[in-house]
Amino acid sequence: MRVAIAGAGLAGLSCAKYLVDAGYTPIVLERRDVLGGLVAAWKDEEGDWYETGLHVFFGAYPNMLQLFKELGIEDRLQWKEHTLIFNQPEKPGTYSRFDVPDIPAPINVITSILRNNDMLTWEQKIRFAIGLLPAIVRGQKYVEDMDKYSLLEWLRKQGVDERVNSDIFIAASKALTFINPDEVSATVPLTALNRFLRERYGSKVAFLDGSPTERLCQPMVDYITERGGQVRLNAPLKEILLNEDGTVKGFLLRGLDGAPTKF
Ligand SMILES: Cc1cc2nc3c(=O)[nH]c(=O)nc-3n(C[C@H](O)[C@H](O)[C@H](O)COP(=O)(O)OP(=O)(O)OC[C@H]3O[C@@H](n4cnc5c(N)ncnc54)[C@H](O)[C@@H]3O)c2cc1C
């Protein structure tokens, strides 16, 4: 069976990779002239790469890590120390560390919170740890029930004070979701936190050793095309055309730069 996929972002490319593994023939149609979607990167005239932003790979991403393994490119992930480091606005150049020891979860993350002395007072640590208990005990069900609160409302409910919110959670919320704690559902960051609390290396991060386009997307394209699939750039899928009996007649591609629509 041939399968059309709109978009050569990480979802489209990995979908195509697993379709060729299952014996299908995917054709990935990407509307832009670059692979990667939100992780796209470009080379400037001097040969330097520039990217949409920093991309980190968490230990809590089993599917992504499995994909790296299957492509034979795990060595391109550069694992960092298991530490979260915050720069403090009022004390520039002073870094506050949450060092996660190499012991089982969730004791490792809790220890890192308890050991941090310059951002959290003992009262704040205890309040925060108590606030996390329901997530540890009741898991994702509790996390999903918290959708009725914004992250800021949830933190206030736990009695976490405003300074902790501004010093830690504005940064954490923006890093994970690009929006502020008063705008994001508590479920979103708590989902991540919950994974971090359950998995020993869940909050450990790795960086890719180069641009995602070249070092991650291109190997997926090679894998797909070597096994009979296709990846086409500058191919914006406008419509999947059907015959009367519902079978696929063809793909309508929107013309680029004023060019007419193509069949
Ligand atoms: C600055 C930045 C930093 C980030 N940092 C991290 C991070 O550190 N860790 C993390 O896990 N995640 C991070 N993310 C999020 C992560 O990059 C995205 O969740 C992920 O890349 C989304 O992949 P996707 O394939 O679902 O979608 P996209 O990457 O959006 O891919 C969709 C693709 O479809 C194409 N397309 C759309 N419509 C059509 C059409 N009709 N025809 C053909 N093509 C079409 C688009 O051009 C695009 O290439 C970050 C995102 C950004 C922007």
Image (cartoon, rainbow, N blue to C red):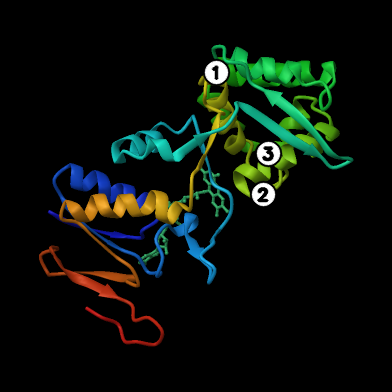
Q: Are marks 1 and 3 in contact (CB under 8 Å)?
A: no
Q: Amino acid at mark 2?
A: Ile
Q: Residues within 10 Å of mark 3 (few under 14, many from 20)?
A: some
**Residue 160 coordinates in the image, percent (x, y):** 79, 27
Q: Which residue is denoted by mark 3 in the rendering?
A: 172
Which numbered disc flags the more N-terminal residue, 1 or 3?
A: 1
**In terms of depth relative to the viewer, which is nearer, 101 or 105?**
101
**Residue 136 coordinates in the image, percent (x, y):** 58, 17
User: Of the numbered discs in the image, which one, if any, rests on residue 179?
Assistant: 2
Q: Is residue 145 visible?
A: no
Which numbered disc flags the more N-terminal residue, 1 or 2?
A: 1
Using residue 162 as the reference point, say whether residue 248 is left or right of it.
left
Q: Is residue 212 visible?
A: yes
Q: Residues within 10 Å of mark 1 (few under 14, many from 20)?
A: few
Secondary structure type for disc 1:
helix
Give the residue displayed 41% in from the left and 84% down from the top: 257
Q: Which residue is denoted by mark 1 in the rendering?
A: 138
Give the residue displayed 53% in from the left and 68% down from the top: 44
